[in-house]
């Protein structure tokens, strides 16, 4: 006897794909950000360290707010805000040359990208029966790891070191 094939809500597949794409963009961004800052903008190492380190800190702060905000406003508006803000602030970063503006855009990009993960996980849990949560979240975890493994390789293959176009590609994703 074979096991019945389980099909998940379309949101699960959608958010697994979005998670992969956003993580891939972030993996490439965070690893090539220092190269761009040093080779193109000729920034000092201390500034590069601050700008690189602020992304995960801002995402953590955004993640704390995201859950409460999604409970009040709903999951869909918060997810749309997250993706729209990510793109806007990534473009703002690409267009900026001043350290203060770079810091602001990198912080805001990280802050709003931190909204996506907890809210998308909550929505996936909302539409998935509890007996399938482990399977769904294992799949999500797998695509995050694959994206972090592929991001730097794609960046190397695309030769994006010091290229501003990479930030526009990440914004488009």
Image (tube, rainbow, N blue to C red):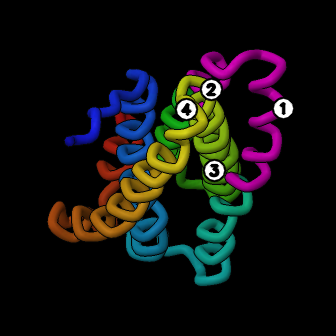
> Label 1, label 2: how many angstroms apart (C-alpha)?
15 Å
Sequence-wise first label, 4 or 3: 3
Residues drawn in magenta: 59-82
Relative vertical location of residue 115 with respect to residue 94 in this rendering, above or below: above
Sequence-wise first label, 1 or 3: 1
Label 1 secondary element:
helix
Rendered residue at 62%/26% (across/down): 126
- Is 144 covered by the magenta stretch? no
Dot 2 corresponds to which residue?
A: 126
Residue 85 shows in the view: no
Rendered residue at 75%/36% (across/down): 66
Q: Nearer the viewer, mark 1 or mark 2?
A: 2
Rendered residue at 39%/74% (across/down): 39
> Label 1, label 4: how many angstroms apart (C-alpha)?
17 Å
In the picture, the disc for residue 68 is: 1
> Label 4, label 3: how many angstroms apart (C-alpha)?
22 Å
Q: Nearer the viewer, mark 4 or mark 3?
A: 4
Residue 65: horizontal and vertical position, in percent?
Answer: 81, 39
**39 with respect to 47 (left or right):** left
In the picture, the disc for residue 140 is: none
Dot 4 corresponds to which residue?
A: 124
Instruction: Please name the predominant secondary structure of the magenta segment in the image.
Output: helix
Residue 34 shows in the view: yes
Relative vertical location of residue 73 with respect to residue 152 in this rendering, above or below: above
Badge 1 crowding class, 10 Å Cα cut-off, few under 14, some 14 to 19, many 20 or more, is: few
- Considering every residue shown, the one lying at the far bottom of the view is 45
Relative vertical location of residue 20 with respect to residue 8 in this rendering, above or below: below
Dot 3 corresponds to which residue?
A: 110
In the image, 86 versus 148, the foreground residue is 148
Residue 169: horizontal and vertical position, in percent?
Answer: 32, 43
């Amino acid at each position: 006897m074979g096991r019945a094939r389980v099909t998940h809500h379309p949101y699960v597949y959608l958010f697994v794909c979005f998670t992969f794409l956003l993580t891939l963009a972030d993996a490439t961004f965070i690893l090539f950000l220092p190269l761009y800052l040093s080779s193109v903008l000729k920034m000092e190492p201390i500034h590069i360290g601050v700008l690189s380190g602020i992304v995960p800190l801002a995402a953590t702060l955004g993640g704390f707010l995201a859950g409460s905000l999604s409970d009040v406003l709903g999951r869909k508006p918060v997810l749309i805000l997250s993706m729209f803000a990510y793109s806007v602030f990534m473009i703002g970063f690409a267009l900026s040359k001043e350290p203060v503006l770079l810091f602001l855009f990198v912080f805001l990009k990280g802050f709003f990208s931190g909204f996506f993960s907890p809210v998308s996980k909550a929505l996936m849990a909302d539409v998935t029966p509890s007996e399938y949560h482990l399977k769904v979240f294992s799949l999500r975890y797998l695509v995050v790891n694959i994206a972090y493994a592929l991001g730097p390789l794609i960046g190397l293959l695309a030769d994006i070191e010091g290229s501003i176009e990479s930030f526009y590609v990440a914004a488009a994703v």
